Image: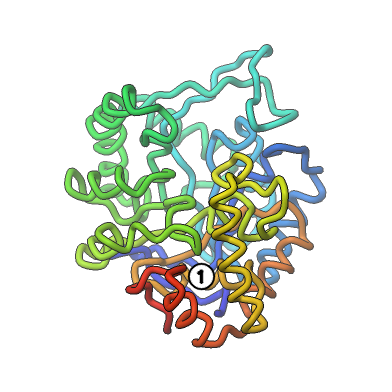
Amino acid sequence: MDPSARRNLGRSKVGLTAIGLGGAPMGNLFRPVAEGDARATVDAAWSGGLRYFDTAPLYGHGLGEQRMGAALRFRPRDDFIVSTKVGRLLVPDAAADGGAYVQVPPHRPVFDYSRDGTLRSVEASLARLGLDRVDLLLIHDIDAFTHGPDEQAQRYRDAMTGAYPALDGLRRAGAVGAIGLGVNDWRVCARAAEDGDFDGFLVAGRYTLLEQEPLDSFLPLCVRRGIGVIAAGVFNSGILATGPIEGAMYNYRPAPADVRDRASRIERVCRSHGVTLAAAALRLPSMHPAIASIVLGMRDADEVARNLALARQSIPDGLWRDLKAEGLLHPTAPTGP
């Protein structure tokens, strides 16, 4: 796998590298990242050929965008792709709780999927990034994973009547190259594909070595419609990187016993072929024709180097055959170039 290879997102002209750098960790997700380490992370990604960089206002309550922009803004603008997200405005609040983000600026994220809120969000993101444009804008977190089943329906309506027309207008005006969603649930993307004209969807944690349900309907839909998919969370919050150790994380929480057991069975097959669990987890999504890029959240230069080495690791075809034979991989999962 060549991490620097480019593929357009769906029918758009936005070309993403096979691996992109996710900006949540440099927003101090779970633990602080020093300014120098944040810059070194972007520099290492650039040196490794990565030219796609994803961020969001939520990441560090603006800190992630600031750090990403500071590391990119003096590089040739046409050489890289930046995506950010809309759906939250940052309101000054000295007492704000950072939640999963630590040592953040005194801002409180407030959901706002209206047209005006969307345009204000884009303007604020450009200011924090210090860039003249972003290439891909994603409506953030309009799924039940974020809002719960009761509130999600209204959030979706707000987004489709407010944020979506605003982003479509920016796309028609040439101010942005592509638009989509950035969510944790593929189901809301399938619905949005019917209700709007989207170039791509960033989906975290749903097409992985542990989960392949999107193969039954969603990914084939994207192929038919010419919609690109960006796979994030390919390690399912950690367990597919660390292995099924005690305390391994899955979907942002400690992995339950059944998930650790399945990961252990997958890992045994990987080891029998001389392949690490993490390398197989990184490779699988890249082989589906709908997947334009894999976004990895990384917090230092060493992590970048490790993941690039994983991407280049040779994986025998027999691994995928054995996983399918043992019922550990969906029978229709693409496993070739």
Please state if 64 lies on the left or on the right of 37 as rendered.
Answer: left
Tell me if residue 284 comes above or below residue 250 in the rendering: below
Q: Quadrant of residue 215?
A: bottom left
Q: In the rendering, at what x and y percent does residue 88 appear?
A: 46, 28
Characterize the local packing of mark 1: few (<14), some (14-19) or many (20 or more) Cα atoms within 10 angstroms.
many
Please state if 15 lies on the left or on the right of 265 as rendered.
Answer: left
Tell me if residue 108 comes above or below residue 188 in the rendering: above
Q: How many marks?
A: 1
**Colour mode?**
rainbow
Question: Camera-side residue: 289 or 247?
Answer: 247
Image quarter where the C terminus lies is bottom left
Q: Residue at x 24, y 34 (%)?
A: 160
Q: Quadrant of residue 207?
A: bottom left
The amino acid type of the residue labelled 1 equals Ala
Q: In the rendering, at what x and y percent does residue 115 appear?
A: 30, 28
Image quarter where the N terminus lies is bottom right
Please state if 75 lies on the left or on the right of 118 as rendered.
Answer: right
Q: Residue at x 28, y 61 (%)?
A: 227
Question: Camera-side residue: 102 or 34?
Answer: 102
Residue with the mark numbered 1: 18
Question: Camera-side residue: 237 or 97?
Answer: 237
Q: In the rendering, at what x and y percent does residue 107 appear?
A: 61, 21
Say what secondary structure mark 1 lies in: loop
Tell me if residue 278 comes above or below residue 160 in the rendering: below
Q: Residue at x 51, y 77 (%)?
A: 5
Q: In the rendering, at what x and y percent does residue 104 appear?
A: 70, 28
Tell me if residue 58 comes above or below residue 77 in the rendering: above
